[in-house]
């Protein structure tokens, strides 16, 4: 038998199980008649601010008139939670969907969809399908979320966000996070050991330790305090990796790329500045601007553009220096860079075939065949099969023809 219950303005009522609907006026309070649980089989509607001093369970819950609902225990809603202003739950808040206009505070939340217009605070576990927050979310415990969208700031712990993470302002994780696609348009900070499928950052990205991500696309500034492991990395700005960078599909960078350790990848394309302890490229490397590899650059094919300066030995099957077009344009932090054509300079070169364009400078060349264009200036040449020299070429030391070249340093 259905028996609806009403609670008057400012009244405190002790309840057990309500077979029907509960209607609470502004300032009302609910307590448990026995134990610590009140169950409402129907909808619970609050006509303003109210207190629930126990665990509470109902089919649906609505808080009207800019009211604030405070629950001292767990809140279980089998349908929808619709709060015009604010709700605070000291225990677990569980529902199908949660829609809060202003502020949500809870120890833990479990739902299919959570939408908060202002601020969301979850202390321990946040488990949800879609989470949308207009202002700020602070959830420093564990996350098990399918998709997270935040208009302003997200300050979270660790766990997993399987789908898209879209943040308009600042995003920070304080523990290891596994994510699908991270879209950040302001500032992003990731905890050590975080892993993801894709990062698309147009502002500032900071990883506090090692980071693994299939695709990294940066249009701004990115720094990784440990190692960066990716399939493909694209940089239009600045990338600073304190450890090593392993990009199985390659690095395509316009601007500045600094790697403290070793770079390894299928390809390397740089328009701007690149530095690493050592660069090991399985396919081709193209450098336009300036590159420094303290222990050397090794690739199957190496092309050094006109006006480019490379320090460190170069090792490859085919090495071309200073034979590119009139220059390369690139963008760095919203500004256009222009790498001017001019004299190309490289250190020692070890290859099967080496060709230097007009006016290029090189250290000692070790190759089977060597071709030196007009005006080249070379320290020394050691070759096996053929040496082609054009006009106005300077070779500081006597040329050596040998049967076998020395082993390269890489």
Image (cartoon, grey):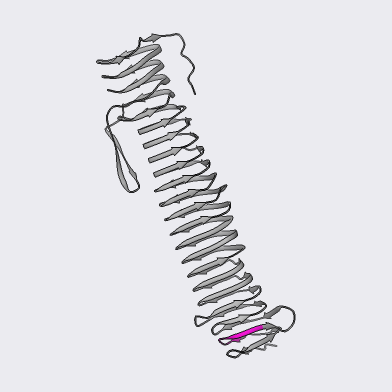
Q: Nearer the viewer, residue 62 or 71?
A: 71
The image shows residue 210 at horizontal and vertical percentages of 55, 44
The image shows residue 237 at horizontal and vertical percentages of 38, 45
Q: Nearer the viewer, residue 374 or 203?
A: 203
Determine the residue located farthest toward the right in the rendered image: 34
The image shows residue 178 at horizontal and vertical percentages of 57, 51
What residue is at 69 percent from the left and 86 percent from the top? 14
Q: Nearer the viewer, residue 116 or 244?
A: 244
What residue is at 61 percent from the left and 73 percent from the top? 89
Q: Nearer the viewer, residue 206 or 315?
A: 206
Determine the residue located farthest toward the bottom in the rendered image: 8
Instruction: Confirm whether residue 243 shows in the render.
Output: yes
Indicate yes or no whether the magenta region holds residue 186: no
The image shows residue 73 at horizontal and vertical percentages of 66, 74
Report which quarter residue 235 is drawn in: top left
What residue is at 27 percent from the left and 29 percent from the top? 342
| 59 shown above or below 371 | below
Report which quarter residue 376 is drawn in: top left
Tell me where the magenta segment starts and ends, as one range: 23-30
Type of secondary structure dominating the magenta stretch: strand
What residue is at 60 percent from the left and 64 percent from the top? 123
Q: Give the number of callouts.
A: 0
Indicate yes or no whether the magenta region holds residue 28: yes
Instruction: Confirm whether residue 254 shows in the render.
Output: no
Determine the residue located farthest toward the left in the rendered image: 391
Q: Quadrant of the N terminus?
A: bottom right
């Amino acid at each position: 038998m259905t028996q609806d219950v009403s609670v008057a303005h400012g009244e405190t009522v002790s309840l057990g199980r309500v077979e029907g609907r509960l209607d609470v006026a502004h300032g009302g309070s609910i307590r448990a008649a026995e134990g610590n649980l009140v169950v409402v089989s129907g909808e619970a509607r609050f006509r303003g601010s109210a207190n629930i001093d126990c665990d509470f369970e109902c089919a649906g819950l609505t808080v009207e008139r800019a009211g604030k609902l405070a629950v001292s225990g767990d809140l279980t809603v089998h349908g929808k939670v619709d709060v015009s202003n604010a709700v605070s739950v000291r225990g677990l808040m569980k529902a199908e969907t949660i829609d809060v206009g202003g502020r949500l505070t809870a120890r833990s939340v479990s739902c299919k969809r959570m939408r908060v217009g202002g601020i969301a605070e979850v202390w321990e576990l946040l488990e949800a399908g879609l989470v949308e927050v207009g202002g700020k979310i602070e959830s420093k415990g564990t996350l098990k979320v399918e998709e997270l969208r935040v208009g302003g700031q997200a300050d979270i712990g660790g766990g997993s966000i399987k789908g898209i993470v879209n943040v308009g302002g600042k995003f920070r994780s304080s523990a290891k996070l596994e994510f699908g696609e991270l879209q950040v348009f302001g500032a992003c900070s990731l905890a050590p050991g975080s892993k993801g499928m894709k990062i698309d950052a147009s502002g500032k990205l900071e990883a506090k330790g090692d980071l693994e991500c299939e695709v990294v696309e940066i249009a701004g500034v990115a720094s990784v305090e440990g190692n960066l492991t990716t399939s493909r990395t694209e940089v239009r700005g600045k990338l600073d990796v304190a450890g090593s960078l392993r990009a199985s599909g390659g690095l395509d960078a316009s601007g500045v790329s600094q790697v403290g350790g070793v770079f390894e990848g299928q390809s390397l394309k740089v328009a701007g500045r690149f530095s690493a302890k050592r660069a090991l490229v399985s396919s081709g490397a193209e450098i336009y601007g300036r590159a420094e590899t303290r222990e050397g650059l090794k690739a199957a094919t190496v092309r050094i553009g006109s006006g480019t300066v490379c320090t460190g030995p170069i090792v490859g099957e085919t090495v071309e220096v200073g034979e590119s077009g009139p220059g390369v344009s690139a963008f760095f932090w919203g500004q256009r860079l222009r790498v001017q054509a001019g004299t190309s300079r490289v250190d020692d070169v070890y290859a099967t075939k080496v060709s230097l364009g007009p006016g290029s400078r090189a250290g000692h060349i070790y190759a089977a065949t060597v071709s030196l264009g007009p005006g080249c200036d070379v320290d020394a040449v050691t070759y096996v099969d053929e040496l082609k020299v054009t006009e106005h070429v300077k070779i500081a030391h006597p040329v050596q023809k040998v049967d076998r070249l020395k082993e390269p340093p890489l």
